[in-house]
């Protein structure tokens, strides 16, 4: 496991702490969840672009549905 240190403005850090508290999870868990979501969104985007380049409209439509489900 890797430990990352990041610099955030105080107001953003405080908002993230408040979100974690409201969800009843640690700040570490919140950052894990947000990071995982960002990675899933990026993966779906990359798969869509690859399908588009291959000219597979059925797969591209399926990936668009996945992006919609992620709220993109």
Image (cartoon, rainbow, N blue to C red):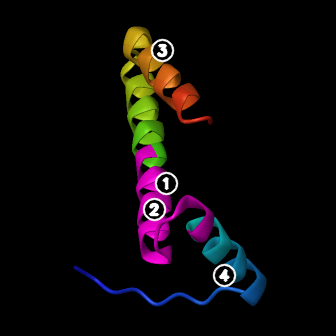
Tell me if 33 is positioned left or right of 6 in this view. left
Marks 2 and 3, the one that precedes in the sequence: 2
Foreground pick, 57 / 54:
57
Residue to which mark 2 is pinned: 35
Start-end of magenta stretch: 21-40
Q: Is residue 28 magenta?
A: yes
Marks 1 and 3, the one that precedes in the sequence: 1
Q: State the separation of the CA atoms marked 1 and 2.
A: 5 Å
Asked if residue 34 is positioned above or below residue 37 in the image, the reply reads: below
Task: Check if mark 1's residue and mark 2's residue have beta carbons within 8 Å.
Answer: yes
Query: In front of the other: label 4 or label 3?
Result: 4
> Residue 26 appears at what percent x and percent y?
46, 73
Q: Quadrant of the C terminus?
A: top right
> Could you tell me what secondary structure mostly forms the magenta stretch?
helix
Q: State the separation of the CA atoms marked 4 and 3.
A: 38 Å
Local secondary structure at mark 4 = helix
Q: State the separation of the CA atoms marked 2 and 3.
A: 25 Å
**Which residue is situated farthest in the left direction here?**
1
What residue is rendered at 62% in x and 63% in y? 22
Which circle marks residue 38 in the picture?
Answer: 1
Q: State the separation of the CA atoms marked 1 and 4.
A: 18 Å
Marks 1 and 4, the one that precedes in the sequence: 4
What residue is rendered at 65% in x and 85% in y? 8
Marks 2 and 4, the one that precedes in the sequence: 4
> Residue 43 appears at what percent x and percent y?
39, 44
Query: In front of the other: label 1 or label 3?
Result: 1
Q: Is residue 30 magenta?
A: yes
Marks 4 and 3, the one that precedes in the sequence: 4
> Residue 54 appears at what percent x and percent y?
36, 22
Residue to which mark 3 is pinned: 61
Q: Quadrant of residue 50?
A: top left
């Amino acid at each position: 496991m890797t430990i990352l240190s990041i610099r955030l403005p105080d107001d953003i850090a405080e908002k993230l702490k408040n979100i974690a508290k409201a969800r009843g999870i640690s700040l570490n868990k919140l950052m894990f969840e947000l990071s995982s979501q960002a990675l899933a969104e990026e993966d779906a985007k990359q798969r869509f672009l690859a399908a588009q380049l291959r000219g597979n409209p059925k797969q591209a439509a399926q990936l668009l549905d996945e992006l919609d489900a992620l709220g993109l």
